[in-house]
Image (spheres, rainbow, N blue to C red):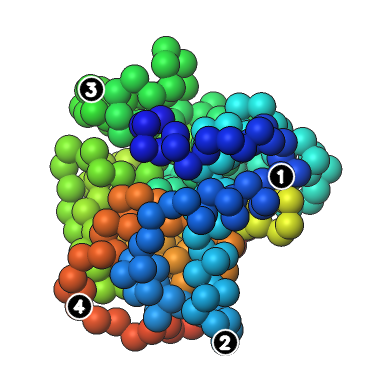
Amino acid sequence: MTASRRKVFTDLPDLLDPAMLDANARIVAGRMKSWEKSLGYVYNHTRHGGMGRDQWNDHAVSSIAASQIQMYFLVRSHDYFKAMQDDPRLLAAIDDLNAPGGTLVLACHNGFRQLFVDFFSRFARDGLIVRAKAGVGGNDPRNVSAASDPRGALFTALRRLTDGGQVYVAPDGPHATRTRDINVLGHRVPVGEGASFLAWQGRARVRWLSIRREGQTFIPVLRAGPQRQEGERASDYDERFWDFYARCIADHLQGPPWDTAIGGNWMQLLRNDVVSELPRYQAPTTSMKAEI
């Protein structure tokens, strides 16, 4: 944690108390720098149901603060999924995650990101996390670094998928070595190309992972992505894959502000000039609603 980031967490003695998450998040939110341009753009393209800008902004910034408190403090000391151990929503997500055949789990750097990793690492029976930065995850064999050895990480991940395991990757990270651009709410977003190759070459089931918050309960949700069709060319599948990923991120940003927890690299992306203006929101098609 950087010194500047550490400052916003000073004199909060109850950071390790999950019951204090909301109260501490509101305090931390008040100490964080303003991201008016970024949040304003998202608000103007969101489904806020008539929620006023100030109220929406309070929820959005508090979700960012809550995500950071979880990341740096609570996840190491608190089991967020223990209270859900008999919840059919958690059990259904675990069953889908471990269904027969290789599963490529996609995430992004928005939302309750540490809980994404926590859910996957705890419940994937043969899981592998592709990390963008070297050294993250320590010597845990369930982690590979795409930064220190991109080819080796790609090969290891592909082998895990073809063996029927589960692979977690967040292609929107800022450290990808080979990138292409996708369009999210009119912004050009670089993503690591390797994810679509893994899905196509490994004939993997694709799932988008998000966390939906209901009070103090954080519910993992898996959304079905495009499956490689028989005889489908890699270039055609590539377009379907990245269109799905871009729509999932847009849906997340346009969803309830208490779930968004917009990440730092996305704050920078959303400050940039729009490259192609899109409608404020279009209702998801039937295929976009496919959730497990």
Q: CA distance from mark 3 to mark 2?
A: 47 Å
Amino acid beneath label 2: Gly
Kindly identify the residue that appears in the image at 71 percent across and 40 percent down: 18
Residue 50, numbered circle? 2
Q: CA distance from mark 1 to mark 2?
A: 29 Å
- Does any portion of residue 102 appear in the rendered image? no
Among numbered discs 2 and 4, the one appearing first in the sequence: 2
x then y, percent, for residue 168? 44, 38
- Residue holding disc 4: 276
Q: Is 111 placed above or below 247 here? A: above
Label 2 sits on a secondary structure element that is loop
- Residue holding disc 1: 20
Among numbered discs 3 and 2, the one appearing first in the sequence: 2
Label 1 sits on a secondary structure element that is helix
**Dot in front, 1 or 4:** 1
Amino acid beneath label 4: Ser
Among numbered discs 3 and 4, the one appearing first in the sequence: 3
Q: CA distance from mark 1 to mark 4?
A: 41 Å
Amino acid beneath label 1: Met
Q: In which quarter of the view is residue 195 placed?
A: top left
